[in-house]
Image: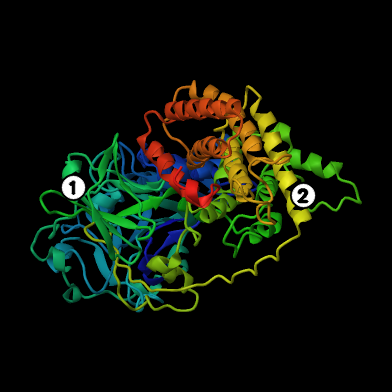
Amino acid sequence: MIGSANLTGAGLVGNLETVSTIVVSEEDRSAAPLLAEALRYFERHADKKDRAMRDVLARARARSPWLADVEPGEEVTIGTERVAFLTESENAGIGERFRDFVGDDVVDQLIVVSPYADRTLEGFSQLRAAFGRPATSFIVNPHEQDFTADTFEAQTGASLHSSEPHEWGGERPLHAKMVIVCGSRADYVLSGSANASVAGLYSRLGGSGNAEAAIARTEPAGTAIDRLKLSDCLSTPMPLSMLSLRHRARSGTEVDRQLPPDGGDCWIEHGFIFWRPPTNSVPAECLLRLMDGTGAEMAVSSPAAEGDYFSLPLDADVGTPRSAVVVFPDGRESAPMPIAALNRLQTNANPPRTGAAGRILAELEGRDDIDDEDYERAMKLLALIRPDETRKRDVARRTDDNEEDEEGKILPENEFGEIAKTPEGRQDLKTGPISEMRRLVNAFLGLGALESADSDDLDPLADHIKNANTTDRTAADGSGADDRNDNGNDDDDGGDTGSSRPRRPTRPKGSMSIANARADKLVGHVDETCRALARPDLDPLNLESAIRIHLLVNVFLSRCAPVGEKASVKHPILAVELPRSWIRILGRLIIALEASLERTAAKPPAEDIDEECVEALATILFCAGLLLDASRIAEMPRAMVRQFEAANANLARSVGKILDGNPMADAAVRQKLPVLMAKHRLFPVKHAAV
């Protein structure tokens, strides 16, 4: 979709807009070169340090692997019509490229639809000159314009028209941007984001003007005006006496107000708010004003330097901010910056969970703690995102009398870490059903909020969209329209909507025999993981491995009884007593991780560390410290205590090397340790401070 609508309530459900939609799929690739070119356009414009945009583009690439075989192209033929994706380049703007698209066809008439223009009509005049100054109709917003009657009268052969006679023009403020060239062979329609201004139509990549995008397409000659329902507008000239100069243009200058300065960009990661300041600023003297989704101020803080970035700890009790404004030392304030929550973006990109994954995830809803079967559920979700051929082999091996459901068996030991070895697998691990389960388990641990990753009750735009099919209350509110370099901003009003999720009934307590059986399964999973970690090629911070280790250790600990206490249905795994001593069982895992993590630490440190790996590192360090303290309190053999002392020191050293040069991830690991300690209270009260 490419069009004039901004991402506001007015843009999506209120204004009179124009949008071109092109459908591309693996099955129908006729327009695929345009999509490939569009992705390349985003990659060219996006800041290389913008983590949120980089992740979005990676998801797009991972979910359309077939697009890698498509050569990007600016023009295709769909049926009998030509379609082009036009953006500004170093040598030509959209206006010039549209002129090339029309070619040598004889132009009979030109129609321009635009709510904004230059005060001098320079962009409009330049467009007319490019097509030989044919008879031109200019459709504008009837209520305010950027030019005077004298300025328009100088445009010989041009007529002025209001958008009000359009079928929806009386109800919706004009924000559509469109050019129609009526040629002898075809009609040529340009629609997109560019106003009829120099900044919109004649900007240059890397130079002055706006970054714009548009779709140009041919249509049968003489059909475009009626199809777009512009006949009524064109049949009624707008008297020049009705022109009303836009307020900001009345001073006689093109811009009557100072545009707010850029504030840089913000994102949430590892439990911190990170800020990359704009160039030519003094970050140490700036303040960040944080706001929620309604624009209400939440806090004003001074960020601390963290390498190339600045950061603030995220206060979970206050809530998640949605935007920030930089207060500069001289008192000026920046334009509002949206705060990109990387995990929320991943979750929002997920399709609705249905089928086997949906049924597994439904078992987690409404609970307030970890279940002893959660690790097996995680393994079943991982099995669902294995390569298709692997799952097909599993299906072929099933027999008619096998009652195994469609989610299949738990991942076999020899496939430990295999999913993360492909881009598609990594993407599924970060945004597939396993990511949702990880989020829910983290909420039980206290490492994240249990509510939805994106609360619509703090998002006015979400309220607009959700209610668009039942009400059109923005249609007549006149919440107007404008663009950044064409001097203005879209307004967006909002609403508040509440939702509640029905809680599932708690499961009845099972018998001790059932609890023991499930505990034995968990012990088996620990043993499987130890054997997998013994493989010299296995990286414990491989994305899949990190997720599995984090979930396994925390699910296992949730079934453990504190040192010195008796077994119960909820905590059947005892600290010292055999055959299931959690100190010994997890001790084997920690010692296996010691050698495996040492190999990982010997590699050059990664520039970015995934959130999942940060969680795994925190869990590993916590578990190592827990086992050392527990072995001392339980008065385990001195040789075992010394082994735990060595493992604890070696793991801390390896984790330090892995986090070297990444202070944000290091701070996040340290931040998670006390949370895990508070969750897993496995010492008697008198040792609680150990």
Task: Identify whether 161 is placed above or below 415.
Answer: below
Q: Which residue is at a point 50% across and 29% down the rendered structure image?
A: 651
**In the picture provided, is 355 more to the left or to the right than 263?**
right
Q: Which residue is mark 1?
A: 286
**In the picture provided, is 14 more to the left or to the right than 412?**
left
Q: Position of residue 485 (x, y in %)?
A: 24, 53
Mark 1 touching mark 2, by CB under 8 A?
no
Q: Which residue is at a point 25% across and 63% down the rendered structure image?
A: 158
Real-space Cα separation, disc 1 to disc 2, in angstroms: 58 Å
Mark 1 Cα shell of 10 Å, populated few (<14), some (14-19), many (≥20): some
Q: Amino acid at mark 1?
A: Cys
Q: Position of residue 441 (x, y in %)?
A: 57, 52
Q: Position of residue 327 (x, y in %)?
A: 18, 53
Residue 6, numbered circle = none
Residue 517, numbered circle = 2
Q: Position of residue 101 (x, y in %)?
A: 41, 46
Question: From this viewpoint, which residue is outermost toward the right?
Answer: 401
Q: How is the image coloured?
A: rainbow
Q: Circle 1 sits in a helix, a strand or a loop, which is it? A: loop
**In the picture provided, is 592 more to the left or to the right than 48?**
right
Does any portion of residue 675 appear in the rendered image?
Answer: yes
Mark 2 Cα shell of 10 Å, populated few (<14), some (14-19), many (≥20): few
Q: Which residue is at a point 69% across and 59% down the rendered structure image?
A: 359
Q: Which sits in the foreground, 386 or 688?
A: 688
- When asked about the image quadrant of residue 479, the answer is bottom left
Task: Identify whether 271 is placed above or below 585.
Answer: below
Q: Which sits in the foreground, 315 or 688?
A: 688
Q: Amino acid at mark 2?
A: Ala
Q: Which sits in the foreground, 634 or 297?
A: 634
- When asked about the image quadrant of residue 568, the answer is bottom right
